[in-house]
Image: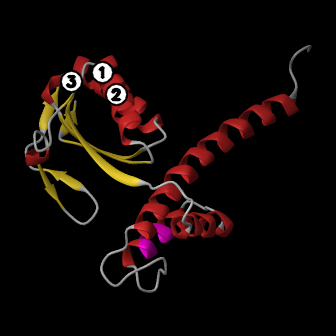
Amino acid sequence: MSGHSKWAQIKYKKGATDAKKGKIFSKLSRAITIVAQNPPAGGGPDPKTNSKLATAIEEARKNNMPNDNIGRAVKRATEKDSAELKEVVYEAYGPGGSALVITAVTDNSNRTTNEIKHLLSEHGAKLGEQGSAAWAFNKESKEFVAKYPVSLSPEDSKKFEELLSALSDHDDVQEVYSNAEMK
């Protein structure tokens, strides 16, 4: 039974689970920081006066993010030396003519833009101009909702799923909205 260790399997699974949690916590932390840095009128880094911050913290707690991590994310927003995070929105067209709206939080929009362009081109998609894909969606509280759904062929569906997977693996990407309906 050489090479077959129960501990090795547990260690591998735990490592994979911890890596997934780390990515989720990183995205949630960035979302908290950006909402705390850019509060709505009258808000601030206090969830009692900043409803968007309260919502972001609630989402983090649903994902079992430790309170220490939440506190650090809020604190990072109030520190003068911290990197300025900003939210950026990309519009793109993917396989089968599907429209995409990609939201990201970054400290360097040039780097993120180039990385998103690269991911899109690898998967047969193209970055569009501002307003080129947003017209296909209604913007509601947090979800862009598709006005005009597009049905994808099985081949385009596979390409589209690969694109979504690549985008969701990117550290800066927060949400990806699409009007694609897969068969």
Residue located at (59% from left, 69% from top): 75
Q: Which residue is mark 2?
A: 163
Label 2 vs label 1, nearer the camera: 2
Q: Give the Cα distance between marks 3 and 1.
A: 7 Å
Q: Position of residue 49 (x, y in %)?
A: 41, 85
Quadrant occupied by the C terminus: top left
Three-letter amino acid code at the position of disc 1: Lys
* Tag 2 and tag 1, C-beta contact below 8 Å: yes
Judge whether residue 129 is colored magenta: no
Q: Principal SS element in the magenta part?
A: helix
In this view, which residue lies farthest toward the front?
81
Which contiguous range is marked in magenta? Answer: 53-58
> Within 10 Å of the Cα at label 3, are there few (<14), some (14-19), or many (20+) other Cα atoms?
many
Residue located at (55% from left, 59% from top): 63
Q: Which residue is mark 3?
A: 95
Q: Position of residue 122 (x, y in %)?
A: 34, 18
SS for tag 1?
A: helix
SS for tag 3?
A: helix
Above or below 69: residue 44: below
Q: Which residue is mark 1?
A: 159
* Tag 3 and tag 1, C-beta contact below 8 Å: yes
Q: Give the Cα distance between marks 2 and 1.
A: 6 Å
